[in-house]
Image (cartoon, rainbow, N blue to C red):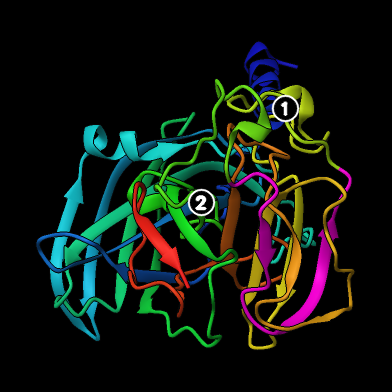
Amino acid sequence: MSILACVLLLGLGGAAANPAPAAMAELTLQPFPSHVYKAEDRSHEPTASWIFSLTVQSTQPIQLAPESMAIDLMHGRQVLRHSTYNREGFEPLTYTSALSPTLPDGAPSPSPLYWPLSIRLRYVEPATLPVDAMHILVKLKDAQGRTHTVHQDVAISTYQQKAQLIFPFRGKGIVLQAGAMNGGHRDRSGQYALDSTVLDEGWSPLKPGDGKHNADYYGYGHDLLAPADGTVVRVRNDRPDQPVGDTSDPAYYAPEFPRGGDPGNNIVIDHGNGEFSMIAHLQPGSIRVTPGQRVAQGQVIGKLGHSGDTDTPHVHYQLQSGPDFRYADALPCHFDNIAQKILDRGTYFEAK
C-alpha cells in the first residue's frame, strides 16, 4: 500500500470518529401564570398593569444567554406599540427559576423538559389602551454561539370575578403587603394576594408590649371567615406559630419550603366556578373545617395566626384558579364589604 493510500485511509478513519454536530434544542416559551390578567391601579393617572414570567422551555439541557427581544402590544391585529431590547436591556429582565420543570398544571412532563432561563415582564399602561395580546420574539445564544429564535403570543385580558367575596375578617384592618405590581407577592398564584391584619378601634395593630410576642398584636387570634359559599378542598392545621412576633425563622418552615414561601396552616375553598380562596398563616389547631365540608359566607373557619413564612401575625388571602397554590393562576379580586376596590400596601380599610 502506498504512503498516499495510508494517509487517505487514516484521514477517512479520523473523520468517521468525529461525532456528528449536536442537534439544536427545541425551545418554546411558556407564560406563568398561564392566563395573564391586567388590573386597574390606584394612581392619579388611570392606568392598568400586569406582570408575568415567560419561561424558556427546552427539550434538552442547554445554557442560554439573552441576545435580544422584541415585543408588540396588540389589539386584534393592530400593533399599538413596538418595543425592542438589545442585550443590555434584555439581560436584567432574565432570571433562573428555582422550581423543577413541570407542565403548567403541575403534572410531570411525559418527555424531558428543562427551564434554562425565565423572563419577567411588567407593564403599566394607560387604562384606555386596549391591549388584548402581546407578540414576543426572543433571541438567545447557546454555549456554542448558536442563535436560537423563539416567539410566543400571550393573551392579556381583564378578569371578570364570579364569586361575591367578603374579606376574611370583619373590622378595621390594614394591608401589610399586596400584589406583584405593588412590590409584593410575585409567585404564580399570589400576584394579587393580600397580607392584612386587624386593627383596634384606634387603628393600631399593637397592644401594649414590644412586639416580640404574638399576643402583642391585636389581630392575633381574631376570627377568620369564609369569603364566600363553597366546599373546603384543602386544610393544613399542624404547623406551629412562629414564636417571635416580629420574626420569620426558617426553622419553623415546613420541610418542603426550605427557602420560604410556606403558607403555614391554611384553608382552600372551592367556590364552584373556577375560583378558589386560599386563607393562610392560621393559628395551629384553630381550623374548624375539614376537606369536603360545605361552608357558608361569613362562617368562622379558624383564627388569625403566625404560622409559616411570616414576620408578623396576619392573614394571607388570595383568589386562585385551582386548589394547589403552586400550580394555580392568580385572579384579581375585590370584596363587597370593603369600600375600596383597590387595596395596596398601607391601605387602611374597614370590613363591614
Which corner quadrant holds the N terminus? Answer: top right
Report whether 163 appears left or right of 95. Answer: right
Which residue: 70% across, 16% down? 6
Which residue, given by chain and number where applicable, does mark 1 sit on?
Answer: 17
Residue 177 seen anywhere in this rendered image of the structure? no
Residue 255 rendering spot, x and y as whole percentages: 83, 33
Residue 42 seen anywhere in this rendered image of the structure? yes
User: Magenta region: which residues?
Assistant: 219-238
Mark 2 to mark 1 CA distance (whole Å): 66 Å
Mark before the other along the chain sequence, 2 or 1 = 1
Q: Is residue 315 magenta?
A: no
Q: Is residue 106 above or below residue 207?
A: below
Which residue, given by chain and number where applicable, does mark 2 sit on?
Answer: 196
Observer-nearest residue: 70 or 1?
Answer: 70
Query: The disc labelled 2 sits on which kind of residue?
Result: Ser
Query: The disc labelled 1 sits on which kind of residue?
Result: Ala
Mark 2 neighbour density, 10 Å: few (under 14) some (14–19) many (20 or more): many
